[in-house]
Amino acid sequence: MTMLSTYERRALAAFGAVAATVLLGFVFVAGGLVAVMRDQHETLATLQGVIAQAAARRGQSEAQGAQERTAAADLSRRLFAVRTPSDFQSQLQSTLKAAADRHGIRVDVLQPVKGDRVGGLSRLLLRLEGTVPQARLAAFVAELALQEPAIFVQDLELRPLMPVLGRGGGAAAGDTVLARIELAAFSAAPGGSR
């Protein structure tokens, strides 16, 4: 039976404390992100409702036509204004990269996953993988949800970075997570395949 030295016990205790801190931070951030994702799904449902209402009201009176135009203008601000699927992909990737840069997110992968048509709109799904400071993750997701045009979080996976003892990983690694985020955006452009 091997006894641990004082240094080894302290190192193990420090590692346990850092791991507990990372876990608590992860739980806190995840709770906030779930709330933001719910809000995004409600916004998407509202957008789909506006589209359905606009289609149902076609051919009605001039006053109702003005309401449709107002609803369409509100909807168009939430859509990417592009002419082709390749322009859509390029503009979405540029928007995501700029937002990631503003929040100190190191993007390792930013690639299209799927393009299709949904409710008469083109939808593009992208996957973003990278290293994210925990303190900036919720602000990043909120910015995407609130910006015009809107970008919706479809899926989110987070894994904490664990510090490596003796390599200077320390607190910085505990403040950062590995993220895989699947995002969706919409456009009125024809097409939808990548």
Image (cartoon, rainbow, N blue to C red):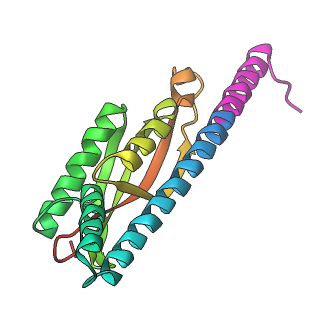
Answer above or below: position of 62 versus 109. below
Query: Residue at coordinates 23% horizontally, 55% vertically from top-left?
Result: 92
Viewer-proximal residue, 95 or 66? 66
Q: Residue 170 location, x and y as percent?
A: 56, 21
Query: Residue at coordinates 38% horizontally, 70% vertically from top-left?
Result: 50
Extent of the magenta region: 1-22
8 drawn magenta? yes
Q: Is residue 172 left or right of residue 188?
A: right
Query: Residue at coordinates 68% horizontally, 33% vertically from top-left?
Result: 19
Q: Quadrant of residue 27?
A: top right
Q: Residue 91 location, x and y as percent?
A: 18, 54
Q: Which secondary structure is most common in the magenta stretch? A: helix
Q: Is residue 73 left or right of residue 164?
A: left
Answer above or below: position of 119 versus 156. below
Q: What residue occupies the far left of the structure in this picture?
A: 83
Q: Is residue 4 left or right of residue 61?
A: right
Viewer-proximal residue, 43 or 187? 43
Quadrant of the frame with the N terminus: top right
Q: Residue 171 location, x and y as percent?
A: 56, 22
Q: Is residue 81 left or right of residue 130?
A: left
Viewer-proximal residue, 158 or 152? 152
Q: Residue 110 location, x and y as percent?
A: 29, 53
Q: Quadrant of residue 111?
A: bottom left
Viewer-proximal residue, 88 or 26? 88
Quadrant of the frame with the C terminus: bottom left
How many discs appear?
0
